[in-house]
Amino acid sequence: MNPHTTSSEMPEMLHPVSWANPQVLEKKISTRKTQLKIGVPKEQSLQENRVSLIPEAVGVLVLNGHTVLIEHNAGAAAQFSDRAYIEVGAQIVYESAEIYKECDVIVKITPLSSDELQMMQDGKTLLSAVHLGSIKPDYLKTLTQKNITAIGFEFIRNSESEFPMLQMMSEIAGASSILIASELLTVNNGGKGLLLGGITGVPPAVVTVLGAGNAGVHAAITALGLGADVKVIDEDIAKLRRLEYILGRKVYTAVSQQNYIEEAVISADVVIGAIFKSSGRTPVIVTEEMVTRMREGSVIVDISIDQGGCFETSEVTTHSKPTYIRHGVIHYCVPNIASRVPNTASSAISNILAPMLVQLGNGGTLNDWLGVDRYIKSGIYAYRRHITHKALAGMFGLDYMDIDLLYAAHF
C-alpha cells in the first residue's frame, strides 16, 4: 500500500476500520470473515491495571464474527466489569490456561510471564509490549521454538512511519509525569516545597524535558499549562522546531550536547527523561555526576525507564514504592506510568488493537494479512521460528531473518 494512497484507492477489505490511524470504532460487519478466537488474559505483571481490549472493542470483534474469551476480572482494575464484557458477547473464563489453550490470538499489555510463556501454545499469535529494558534472550528463544508469531507494540508503525501505540502511551506518560513531579515537589514527599507554576511575585519551578518526541511534547505542554518555566533538549532540531510550532510560541530549546544537558539538568527543579529509541536501549545522557550537582529536593521522572532509562542513577521502581532518593534527588522510575490511569489507557490501546484484529480476520490468514499490509511487518519480531527484528536480534547476538524472505517462502 502506498503511504499516500487515498481512502478511495484502498482495497475494499481495508475499509471497515483502519488501525494505522486510531479512531472511534465503527460497528461494521465484514462480508468476508475468518473467525478468530481471541483471548484476553488477566495481566500478571505487578500493578498492571490496564486491559488490552475494552468492552466496546470486544463488541466490534464479536459483530465481525470473532469469538473473544476474557479471563475473569481481567478488566476490573480499569473499571470494566465482567458483566460489561458479557453484554457485548464475550465469554468469561476462570482459568488463564483455558485462554492459552483455546485461542488463536493472545492479546496482552505486558510481555508473557514465565508461566504464561509455558502455557502459550505452539503456532499461536501474540500481541503485547516487548519492554526492551527487561526482555531476555531465553524469552525470544522460547518464542521461536514454539513457532509463535509475536507482534510488539513498540515496533508497530503506521503509513506515516509513526508508532501509534507508543504515541498513545507517550501522551499519557508525558502529561502524567508533570502531575507526578508537581506532587513530589511538595515537602510531604521530600521535595523542595515548590508550587510548580509559582504565584504572583514568586517565580515558577524550572522543568527540563529531555526529548522532544510525543512524551516530551506532552510533558512540555502540561508543564507550561501549569505555569512552569520549561526547557526542552533534543538531538533533532526538526523536533524542537515542531515543538515550538505546536506550542505556538518560543520556548527554551537546545540541541542534545553535553554542555547544554549539564546546564539544563543542574539548574532544574524537575527533569523529565523522555528519550525514545525505535531500536535498542535508551542512551544514558545524564551522568551520576550531573545528578550530584542538582539541588536537594529536586525531582527526576524517567519515562524512558522501560527502555533502560536515560539517567545513570535510574533504577526500576513500582507503583507501590515509586520513588527513591539518590544524592538528595527524588527519582521516580515506574515503567508503566499509564497504568495509573488504566481506564483512559485501556481505551486508547483498544482503539488501535481492535481495528488490527478486525483486519486480521478480513485478511484470511496471517500470511495473507502480511501480503496486504506491509506496515504490520514492522511490528513482528518473531515469525516462522525466526527473530525478524534486526535490532532485537542484535541486542543478544541471535540469528536474524528478514521477514520478507520468510513471507515469500511461505506464500
Image (cartoon, grey):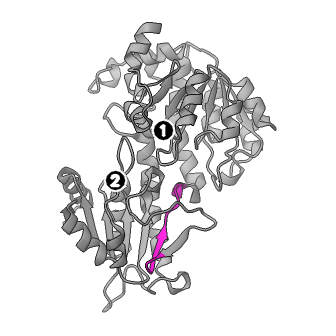
Total numbered badges shown on the rendered structure: 2
**Mark identifier at residue 283:** 2
Q: Is residue 251 visible?
A: no
Tell me the tag on residue 60: none
What residue range appears in magenta?
326-338
Residue type indicated by callout 1: Phe
x, y (%) of residue 257?
A: 20, 61
In the image, 246 versus 45, the foreground residue is: 45
Image coords of residue 93 (percent x, y): 79, 35
Give amino acid for label 2.
Pro
Residue hosting label 1: 153
Report the residue at 53% width, 21% height from top: 360
* Place of residue 118 in the rendered image (x, y in percent of width and height, measured from the top left): 69, 32
Report if residue 336 lies within the magenta region. Answer: yes
Question: At 54% across and 13% down in the image, what residue appears?
Answer: 364
Q: Quick check: 131 left or right of 203?
A: right
Which image quadrant is residue 47 in? bottom right
Residue drawn 71% across the image and 38% down it: 115
